[in-house]
Structure formats: C-alpha cells, structure tokens
Amino acid sequence: MKAIKITQKHLDLNSKLLKSNKLGDIKIFGKLPKRWNNIDGFQYATEKQLIELGFKDVVEPVITSEQYLGEYYLDNDVVTRYVVDKVQKTSQELYDSLVIEGNIVFDNYRKMLSEASSPYMILGTVPNELKVLTQTMLDAKQRITDDLNYYLSIDDVTNLKAFRFDTEEAEQLKQAIQNFK
C-alpha cells in the first residue's frame, strides 16, 4: 500500500479521484490509480518516481486485543496509524458488574432450591442433603464475595476481568439441585 499527504496541487490535478478528501488528508492507495497529476499509466510508476512525488509506504502496526487502530499519520518516511488503548474499566466498575451478575446467578440457584424444597416443606420434612446443598450455595456465595472484595481492595483488574461464575463447581451444584426435582 502507498499513501500521500494531500496538497492543493493534488486537489487541483486529481479532483475526481480526491473529491472526498481535503487539504492535509492522508490518502491511502491499495493500488495506484491509473492517472495521477495528469500522468497516464501511473499504476506502473517506479518506486523512485513514487518517492519523488511524495508517496510513502504504509506500515500497519501490530496491536493487542486491548488496542485498536486509529487515524493514519505521517511518521518520517512512512505512513502508519495511531495505536489507541481501549478504555479500561476500573476495578470498581468490574467489581460492580460482577456483583450484579453474581446476584442474578445466585437468585437462579435460590429459585431452583426453592422449587426443589417446596414439596418437602409442605410435608414438614426437608432432607438433610437439601440443607447441605443450601449451605454449599451460601458458602460458595460468601467465598465469591470474599474473593471479589479482595481483588477490589488490591485493585486487581486482571483477576476481576478473568472472574467467571460458570465454573465446574457451579455446574455440579446446579446438577445436584436439579436431582431433587
């Protein structure tokens, strides 16, 4: 790819090609135009001719998943793009969204436990295994709350971002509750 910073001369001599560009823009060419500055057959221009006319190579920077590519800019002898960091959530924002997600997850478990235990409550007897499941859920919720509070207290964005509720332990608890239905 080649690029050029648009001058008034370029605008005057290439008005059809540059109709959506303005003075100072950087125009990127995936392939060279057939006509440029009244030169026919421009797509066959040599590297030396391109350099003399002010064309630059385009270098695309490598980015991470936490970045995106911004606008093109002239950097010495090449045209490249700004690398922009994505807006990072603070540990407090991550914590708050995890608390909301956790409340939804545990509300679903409470509902499942309630449905599983209601026939036993009507009869006045709740099996010990159901009591153990209820305590297991409460212990898991407390452990998760403690972990999240700890990550927040040390501003651990990495662990907060990586935190998941869909664990094997959660799946086992869900299966055990469903076995009572």
Image (cartoon, grey):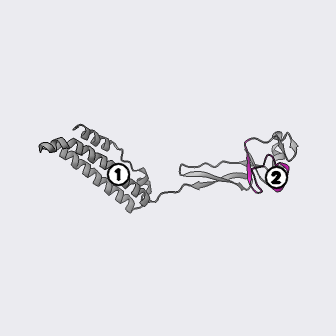
The magenta region covers: 7-30
Dot 1 and dot 2 residues touching (CB under 8 Å): no
Residue pointed to by mark 2: 11
Asked which secondary structure carries label 1, the reply is: helix
Which quadrant is home to the N terminus?
top right
Residue reaching furthest to the bottom = 153
Asked which secondary structure carries label 2, the reply is: helix
Q: Residues within 10 Å of mark 1 (few under 14, many from 20)?
A: some
Q: What's the amino acid at mark 1?
A: Gly
Numbered mark located on residue 102 in the image: 1
Q: Earlier in the sequence, mark 1 or mark 2?
A: 2
- Asked whether 26 or 147 is in front, the reply is 26
Residue 9 magenta: yes
Q: Residue at horizontal 83%, vertical 50%?
A: 53
> Residue 98, percent across and down?
38, 53
Q: Is residue 69 visible?
A: yes
> Residue 45, percent across and down?
83, 42
Q: What's the amino acid at mark 2?
A: Leu
